[in-house]
Image (cartoon, coloured by chain):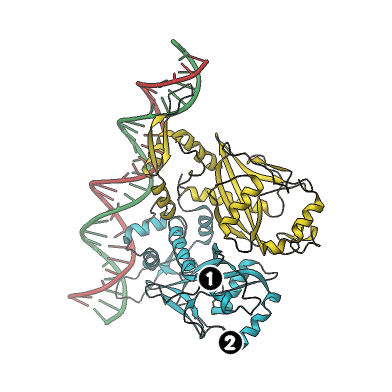
Chain colours: A cyan, B yellow, C green, D red
Amino acid sequence: MLTKDELEQFWAEGNKTYLDHISIDCVVFGFHEGQMKVLMLKSKNEKDWYLPGGFLKIEEPIDDAANRILKDRTGLEKIFLRQFRVFAAPDRTKHHNDLYHDNPFFKQRFISVGYYALVDFFDVTPTADAFSEVCTWRDLEDLPTFQLDHELIFNTALDTLRLQLSYQPIGYNLMPKEFTMPELQKLYETILGKKLDRRNFQRRMLGFGILNKLDQTRKGGAHKAPYLYSFDLENYKAALKEGLKSGW
Amino acid sequence: MLTKDELEQFWAEGNKTYLDHISIDCVVFGFHEGQMKVLMLKSKNEKDWYLPGGFLKIEEPIDDAANRILKDRTGLEKIFLRQFRVFAAPDRTKHHNDLYHDNPFFKQRFISVGYYALVDFFDVTPTADAFSEVCTWRDLEDLPTFQLDHELIFNTALDTLRLQLSYQPIGYNLMPKEFTMPELQKLYETILGKKLDRRNFQRRMLGFGILNKLDQTRKGGAHKAPYLYSFDLENYKAALKEGLKSGW
DNA sequence: ACAAAAGTGTTGTTTTTACACCCATGA
DNA sequence: TCATGGGTGTAAAAACAACACTTTTGT
């Protein structure tokens, strides 16, 4: 981890590398065995936690930037990130603007583009970068205090995720390649925070036509071995684009 | 309308007033009597049309900026604008960057925050500002060629609007305060581009619980006078937040 | 009186919900 | 052999889709 001096030196030339006024913050939801967590960072200098974020390079496509930032700051790669909102209250970075008022890059106003993602948190090992002391999964039931407006960004992402659940498929990039129906159900129950009926869930899910039933089963529990499924990527993507229920 | 020289002079000091790199573009859908249009501008110097857009002032909240820009450029006020996506391809403003390469403000990369709105186009009179020659409603069936990436912005807004229709209420800020069920139905039919059954539409709409039936009727047609309705704003807003169909 | 468009109700079909029994597996 | 959890089907209720006749109004 860098010292405060090293950090300030690094950022002193920030505006040669990065576009002014624009930042990116990522809300990465992690799911595993019925638990939902969010990926957060903390630095030694500061008591509050924050979401992995960073800045847009001068000639960089913004989705590339979101992926680069997530990889650099947390070690997570090849995560599907989805843009969901811009956070642009004029005073949203006031605390940092004041704290780094002698830094030409940090003293400016930033508007932040929010991205969110869902991953299986067992698949990935968060790794703090040089700017952070800690990078870890925090349970949704036991969240720390957030820096700046990161609690708003987090809550907006969670609302977006829950709303998305009712009209779009979910789970690819989050479930392993092969998974059982009860595992997928746990994902839905975790996001929604409530229990669902096993049989109806299965019927409905299959009705969407985005799953392939495999011939194998997953052994290992003291019970009947459940079938494995995988996503039918083509149909899944079509459903992402068009929505799950035609509605009208 | 300003001359090109006046225009360049105005923008020469752009970066004293506006934040670098950030712009706003508005897609205003207008609806009236079964027709859907979009508000567009054109300037004398350029052959292509563009969406009303502008820049974010140094200390300005972004939603305020969107409303200010729409008012300044088109005369439209008190329109509900909804942020829907950021457009940030590195070369999206290349054409303007080259065209105004001697202008320190215009030669930079811009990322644009997209807003969309729905209004009754009979309620408002578009008025071009000093930068534009024409400000008018263009029929969705007869669109001109767009400047820059404005066609992408427009199409994304339309997709967002159509998807929104299936899980959120729509029509407030678009219908007049009091309206008839057939009028509301026309809105849905126009957005969706297909006919709906009168009776089923009414049943479903009422089922959402976001309408108040008024005692008056609207006379004037050579037929039975339809009842007037208004939106129940409280329920409407709740439905916006939570979605119309619980889904799960 | 006629044409145009709105009001309203019923019926068959599909979707959703609620619920229970049997089966495979590991301990 | 027992406990655990998964596989599957059915019946009742609710939602939806299709459909037609009557009423009001202006001409």
- Circle 1 — which element? strand
Residue B195 visible somewhere in the drawing = no
Residue A90 percent location from the top left of the image: 57, 65
From what the image shows, is residue A163 above or below residue A175?
above
Tell me which numbered mark, 1 or 2, is placed earlier along the sequence. Answer: 2
Reading the image, the residue beneath label 2 is A4
Whether residues under marks 1 and 2 lie with C-beta atoms below 8 angstroms apart, the answer is: no
From what the image shows, is residue A84 above or below residue B221?
below
Name the quadrant of the N terminus of chain A: bottom right
> Could you tell whether A181 is left or right of A242 in the image?
left
Seen at 77% across and 48% down, the residue is B2
Looking at the picture, tell me which residue is in the foreground, A81 or A211: A81
> Could you tell whether C16 is left or right of A149 in the image?
left
Seen at 39% across and 48% down, the residue is B235
Corner quadrant of residue B148: bottom right
Depth-wise, is mark 1 or mark 2 nearer the camera?
2
> Could you tell whether A155 is left or right of B14 in the image?
left
Q: Residues within 10 Å of mark 1 (few under 14, many from 20)?
A: many
Residue C11 percent location from the top left of the image: 31, 33
Which chain hosts label 1? A
Looking at the picture, tell me which residue is in the foreground, D3 or A128: A128
Seen at 41% across and 46% down, the residue is B233
Residue B147 visible somewhere in the drawing = yes
- Residue type of the residue flagged with mark 1: Cys
Which chain hosts label 2? A
- Circle 2 — which element? helix
Reading the image, the residue beneath label 1 is A26
- Residue type of the residue flagged with mark 2: Lys
Residue B246 percent location from the top left of the image: 38, 54
